[in-house]
Image (tube, helix red, strand yellow):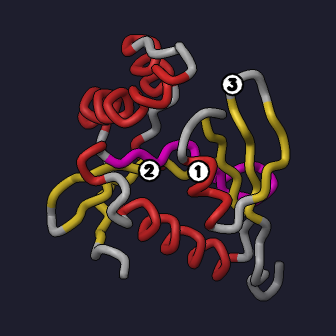
Amino acid sequence: MHPTITFEPARASDASGLADLRVEAMQESLERVGRFDPQRARSRFLDGFAPADTLHILEQGVRVGFCVVRLEPDGAWCLQHLYIRPGHQGLGVGAAVLTRLLARADEEGRAVRVGALKESASNRFYARHGFVLVEQSEFDNHYLRPATHPAPGR
């Protein structure tokens, strides 16, 4: 059973708090590969922050994470960020978010792309949700979840 989640649009003023949440959520994985640098992690997020693509994830009204989904030129979605606060990880929040995102992608006939740090537990998470490894870079694995139900007229 997935937790009940809701989404709330992000605003420009949310940038710093979201960057902090990203650092908190990624710390363990980045330490595992010897690349934890809080300032770098903050900067990488802030440099590309677009409030219009960003949603807060709320569980029972409490902000427990956020996601960033961008439309790519080929019509696919890129799940650029999905971060859940450490105290809420492993409880089904991320799965509930991804289930809703993928259902909407199916309705719209869209593929979804995502990247994950090589040593992160998120690799198993994305594989469980139908993502297929398509490429590896020095530090990241890149996945694709093909469109499964093309929308009419696509």
Q: Read off the residue under disc 3.
A: 139
Q: Provide the secondary structure element on which disc 3 rests.
A: loop
Q: Read off the residue under disc 1.
A: 79
Would you say 111 lies left or right of 23 here?
right
Quarter of the rendering occupied by the N terminus: bottom left
Would you say 136 lies left or right of 65 here?
right
| Residue at x 75% of width, y 22% of height | 138
Q: Provide the secondary structure element on which disc 1 rests.
A: strand
Callout 1: few (<14), some (14-19), or many (20+) C-alpha neighbours within 10 Å? some
Residue 11 vs 42, above or below: the answer is below
Q: Please name which of the two marks, 2 or 3, marks the residue nearer to the observer.
A: 3
Write down the quadrant of residue 33 in the picture.
top right
Would you say 100 lies left or right of 76 here?
left
Q: Earlier in the sequence, mark 3 or mark 1?
A: 1
**Which residues are drawn in magenta?**
70-84
Q: Read off the residue under disc 2.
A: 67
Q: Amino acid at mark 1?
A: Leu
Residue 26 vs 2, above or below: the answer is above
Callout 2: few (<14), some (14-19), or many (20+) C-alpha neighbours within 10 Å? many
- What's the CA distance linking mark 3 and mark 1? 17 Å
The number of numbered discs placed on residues in the rendered structure image is 3
Q: Earlier in the sequence, mark 2 or mark 3?
A: 2
Position of residue 72 measured from the top left corner of the image (x, y, whole percent): 71, 50
Q: Earlier in the sequence, mark 2 or mark 1?
A: 2
| Residue at x 77% of width, y 49% of height | 73
Q: Nearer the viewer, residue 32 or 140?
A: 32
